[in-house]
Image (cartoon, rainbow, N blue to C red):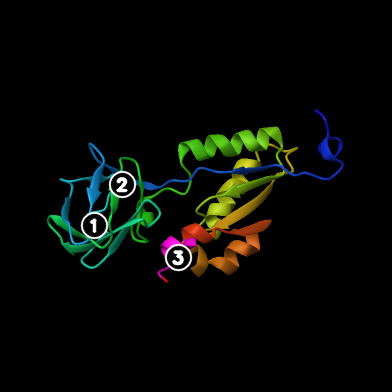
Amino acid sequence: MVSREKISGEQIETMLDTCSSEARIQIAESKEVFIGDIMVLGIDFTIDVPYQSVLSINDILQIDDGKIQFQIIGVEPFVLKSLTHGKLKNGAGVYSPKLSINLPFLSEKGKEDINSAFSKNLDWIACSFVKTKEDVDEIRRMKQNYPECRTKIMAKIETVEAVQNLEEIISVSDGIMIARRDLAVAFPI
C-alpha cells in the first residue's frame, strides 16, 4: 500500500461515516401534501418502526430532514395534520425524538461497515446518531476483534439525546463531530 504522505506530501487521514438506524416511511407511491392536509398513519402511509406506544397528540413528525412536518391531532387511529407543503416519498426518513427509542444504535449495514473499517485500519470511524456513551462502548468492543487496529472513534452529535449526554459521550470518544443539519431537525429554531 502506498503511504498517504507519498500521495500529496501531506498527512491525509481516512474516515468512514457509518450508516445509522433510521425510521422511514412506507408509501405505495409519492404523494404531494399541502398545509392543512389530513392523513391517517397506517392508511395513507406507515412508519417502519413501532410507533403506537410512543407517539401522542401534538407530537411533531419530521419527514425527509424536516422538509415535511406533521402534527399528530388524534390517536386510534393516528390522525396527522400537515404543517408544510412537500412531497412524501417512499423510504424518506422520519424523525421524532420519541421514535428513536425503538431504533437500535447500529444497523446491520453499519456493523458491516465498522468491521470493514477496522479490518482496513482506517484512521477514523464517524459514528452516526450516537446517543449515549454505551453506543461508543459498543463500537470499542467491536474493535477488540482487531488487535492491531489503530482506528479512532468520532461520535457524531445529531440528536437531542446526544446533546443531553454530551459530556459522557466526549469522555469515551476520540473526537466529536457536530452534525448541524441533523441537529437543526432535532431542535426547532
Nearer the camera: disc 1 or disc 3: 3
Left-right relation of 17 to 74: right
Element on which disc 1 rests: loop
**Residue 29 placed where, x, y %?**
24, 37
Task: Determine if the magenta segment contains residue 187.
Answer: yes
User: Tag 2 or tag 3, which sits nearer the N-term?
Assistant: 2
The residue pinned by badge 2 equals: 49
User: Tag 3 or tag 1, which sits nearer the N-term?
Assistant: 1
**Residue 129 placed where, x, y %?**
50, 53
Hey, what amino acid is under mark 2? Val
Q: Is residue 61 above or below residue 13?
A: below
Residue 160 is tagged as 3
**CA–CA distance in space, label 1 to label 3:** 20 Å
**CA–CA distance in space, label 1 to label 2:** 11 Å
For the N terminus, which image quadrant?
A: top right
For the C terminus, which image quadrant?
A: bottom left
Element on which disc 3 rests: helix
Report if residue 10 is visible in the image: yes
Res. 35 image quadrant: bottom left
Residue 53 is tagged as 1
Task: Determine if the magenta segment contains residue 64.
Answer: no
The one nearer the camera, 140 or 19, is: 19
Span colored in magenta: 183-188
